Image: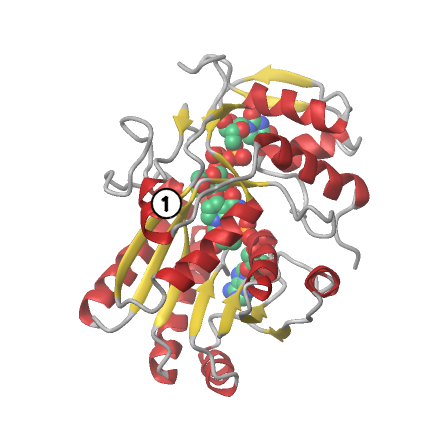
Amino acid sequence: MNVLVTGGMGYIGSHTCIQMIQAGMTPIILDNLYNSKNTVLDRIEKVAGVRPKFIEGDIRDKDLLTSALKDNAIESVIHFAGLKAVGESVEKPLEYYDNNVNGTLVLVDAMREAGVKTLVFSSSATVYGDPASVPITEDFPTSATNPYGRSKLMVEECLTDFQKANSDWSITLLRYFNPVGSHPSGELGEDPQGIPNNLMPFVSQVAVGRREFLSVFGSDYPTKDGTGVRDYIHVMDLSDGHVAALEKVGNKSGLHIYNLGTGNGYSVLEMVKAFEAASGKPVPYKLVERRAGDIAECWADPSKAINDLGWKAERTLNEMTEDTWRWQSNNPDGYPG
Ligand code: NAD
Ligand code: UFG
């Protein structure tokens, strides 16, 4: 199966390409390299034994997309491309709506023109806003507290309306919880540009000596130890979730919505401890004020994906931290180039 993978050079997309190749699928990557490097392709080839075709370009370029879909006999699309930094989205809302919302509309329009009717979209647990309770099921109410989250919610709503009007399409919305970890080879991982926004890349940069200490945002939440609790999911499990979605519901028309999480919540301090154990390095931290817009706790009820997709997150917290450390210590400055 030829699958167009937008944003396939990025963190989650690159790992998913490897799992797709392993499952016998043929990923064709389209990415504008805004937040990634083309040396990612060498690593995918090294690990998977196949160098995916790469089209450098932007999802907002409809002619390019239409020809990419037609010329490569694409049967389905996994759509990762987009901007993802919550704080930046507050400063640059137009860029976020243009890339994430407009970009997705252009993609769907090109798919319609090329007759490709299967789409898997990268959504986020951020669409649950501040959930009334945990664990979270797919029928919880949705809301947004920042432009990034709103862009994901808007895309979900656009795709829902579009699928209603085009009942022969298969559209899957995958709501990721907190992706962490790296390919176990240590060849691929998360390579944020500048100061990392997310916990795990920050922790691993402290452990490797690139940063002095971690600021723990808030220690007075009503959680087990006062720090924020999240559902961290290994990026390899998340990647397998995409393969399962394509295999199990990619050929069934309809709108399919799944949480991709483990169902377990870990606190910031638990993550720090686990990382210290895996790396053998100290991770100095300071307890500071809460970060604006953060919620106390958030974890998934993954039953729907387990039942429908036959998929379950299986990698342990140890694997998440050990694999992150292998990537970070082998590649202290990220990908070359
Ligand atoms: P990433 O930044 O590593 O990957 C995104 C890729 O898309 C990058 O390679 C970037 O160059 C490319 N891209 C961005 N705008 C583009 C455009 N207009 N045209 C073509 N390519 C473009 O991010 P990631 O962590 O791999 O996330 C992938 C998707 O998953 C995103 O849509 C993100 O919002 C979503 N998501 C991520 C997380 C997370 O914590 N990482 C959580 C929930 C959802
Ligand atoms: N945290 C710190 N210090 C840091 C970074 C984070 O204490 O330097 C804490 C946060 O306060 C939070 C936890 O670590 O309690 C996780 O924070 P992240 O920034 O790693 O992740 P978030 O849960 O805030 O958000 C992530 C993605 C969003 C996505 C959301 C749900 O960044 O894009 O998960 O999937 F929407």
Q: Nearer the viewer, residue 190 or 214?
A: 190
Give me the residue at 32% from left, 39% from top: 128
Give me the residue at 29% from left, 67% from top: 252
Read off the residue under disc 1. 306
Give me the residue at 42% from left, 47% from top: 148
For the residue labelled by badge 1, is the local secondary structure a helix, a strand or a loop?
helix
Q: For the residue carrying disc 1, how many other residues have a C-alpha within 10 Å: few (<14), some (14-19), or many (20+)?
A: some
Give me the residue at 46% from left, 24% from top: 229
Q: Nearer the viewer, residue 111 or 301?
A: 301
Camera sees residue 110: yes
Residue 282 at x, y percent in the picture: 75, 20
The picture quadrant where one finds residue 223 is top left
Residue 136 at x, y percent in the picture: 32, 34
Residue 292 at x, y percent in the picture: 45, 28
Query: With respect to residue 109, does 11 lie above or below?
Result: above
User: The disc labelled 1 sits on which kind of residue?
Assistant: Ile
Q: Nearer the viewer, residue 293 or 235?
A: 235
Camera sees residue 95: no
Residue 287 at x, y percent in the picture: 59, 15
